[in-house]
Amino acid sequence: MKFNYLKTGVLLQLQSSGATIRILPDICILISHNLSRLIKLGFLEGFEIVIPDFVEYTVDVLCDGRLKAGFYSELDELRELEKERMISLLYCDYEKPLPKYKQDLIRLEDEFILEIAVATNSILFTSDKELKDEATSIKQPVIYIPPMFHKEIKDLASQLERYG
């Protein structure tokens, strides 16, 4: 099966099988800054990072204060990494109607992320064990970072910045 997806003038040839260089981070990974930190550490350099428009909508509806600020500062950091040619950012539209109520959005968020990962042939990147389990149950590639390792990733990235 093959998908064509056009966004901002870029035509992506999406395959339902075979290797991918795309990563689709979930909201928790973006808010925690783990994606940019792992890119700077050299673990994910060269990947295409897929950012669906519904992710920003979800953050705007469900998050506030530090969580929302963390998300937007991570997007800024990813744009800087793209300028440095360490990654490529791919923005995509989620063409289905989005829930208007918070409860519905909370309930459907993981389903939307997983659906987009499959459609874009992306490796799902998450700290959500339930989402990881759902992805592996349908044989979708997934990178899972348990929440208990977030601090270690932050510390390692800080050491790299300090000592180069």
Image: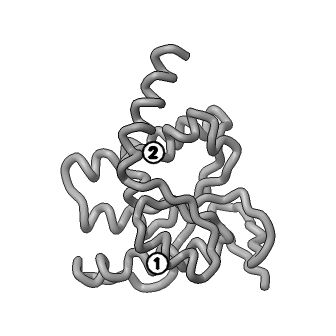
Tell me the residue at 26%/67% (across/down): 61
Question: Which coloring applies here?
Answer: one colour
Residue 141 in the image, given as x and y percentages of width and height: 63, 68
Q: Mark number for residue 112? A: 1
Q: Is residue 91 visible?
A: no
**Mark closer to the chain start, 2 or 1:** 2
Q: Is residue 100 left or right of residue 36?
A: left
Asked which quadrant contains residue 13, the reply is bottom right
Real-space Cα distance between discs 2 and 1?
Answer: 21 Å
Residue 20 in the image, given as x and y percentages of width and height: 74, 62
Q: Is residue 120 visible?
A: yes
Q: Nearer the viewer, residue 129 or 107?
A: 129
Tell me the residue at 53%/71% (across/down): 93
Secondary-structure class at tag 1: helix
Is 77 placed above or below 4 here? above
Q: Nearer the viewer, residue 45 or 52?
A: 45
Residue 158 in the image, given as x and y percentages of width and height: 43, 26
Tell me the residue at 71%/61% (across/down): 10
Amino acid at circle 1: Phe
Is 36 placed above or below 19 here? above
Amino acid at circle 2: Asn
Q: Mark number for residue 152? A: none
Q: Mark number for residue 34? A: 2
Q: Residues within 10 Å of mark 2 (few under 14, many from 20)?
A: many
Q: Is residue 149 left or right of residue 46?
A: left
